[in-house]
Every structure is written in structure tokens, then in C-alpha cells.
Amino acid sequence: MLKKLMGYILNSCGYVERTQYNVAIYENDKLIRQIRTLKLSIKDLSVLNQIITEELKSTDDENKSLWTMLDEMKSSESFGKEQVKSMMEDLNDIFTDEMMKDFKPIGEA
């Protein structure tokens, strides 16, 4: 009974048993080791993040150039009926002008 009373008084004053103290020190040491491991993981992840960021920039540039190339290919493939019709009209005008320059008028028009 006296032992319990002394233990209660000492606990009230802030004293702890030696086993509790050893457990707290062991837990503190374990947490410090975990912090070290986490710091190393953070460094590794930071390096990996930088690598991924650079790769993403490179991929984005490549993506933009591919879209530009696709747009150019699409515009070159769109040489359709309208362009052929326009070229034929231009050729017709040129040939008509060539044929008409050699003709002389026969009378007054």
C-alpha cells in the first residue's frame, strides 16, 4: 500500500518508472530512424520529380511539333476540286489570251 502511495505521489510530481522511461527512449530512437528514412525517400522522390518534369516538357514539345506536322499534312491533302477548278480557270484565261493576241479584227465591232 505504501508502495502504491509513493508511486502515485511520484507520478503526480512528474517522475516515471524506469521501464516507461526506457520505452520512451526506444520509441524516440525508432522515430528518429524513421525520420532519416523519410528524408532519404524525400530526396529520391524530389530527384524523380525533376526527371519526370523534364520528360513531360520534352513530351509536350514533341506533341506540339507532331500536331503542327499533322496540320501541315492535312492542309497539303486538301488540294481538292476547288483548287483544280481554280487552276483550270487560270489556264483557260492564259490560253485564251495567247490565242487572241494573234488574231486581227476584221471589222468594227
Image: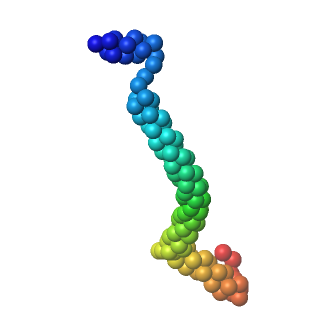
Residue at 59 percent across and 63 percent down: it is 58
Asked if residue 74 can be seen in this view, the reply is: yes
Q: Which picture quadrant has residue 27? A: top left
In the rendered image, residue 61, in percent from the top left (x then y), is placed at 59, 62
Residue at 66 percent across and 75 percent down: it is 109
Name the image colouring. Answer: rainbow
Residue at 54 percent across and 46 percent down: it is 36
Asked if residue 42 can be seen in this view, the reply is: no
Q: Above or below — where is 31 with respect to 64?
A: above
Q: Above or below — where is 88 with respect to 62?
A: below
Looking at the picture, tell me which residue is in the foreground, 49 or 34: 34
Looking at the picture, tell me which residue is in the foreground, 99 or 53: 53
Is 30 on the left-hand or right-hand side of 99?
left
Residue at 58 percent across and 59 percent down: it is 51
Looking at the picture, tell me which residue is in the foreground, 42 or 37: 37
In the rendered image, residue 79, in percent from the top left (x then y), is placed at 51, 74
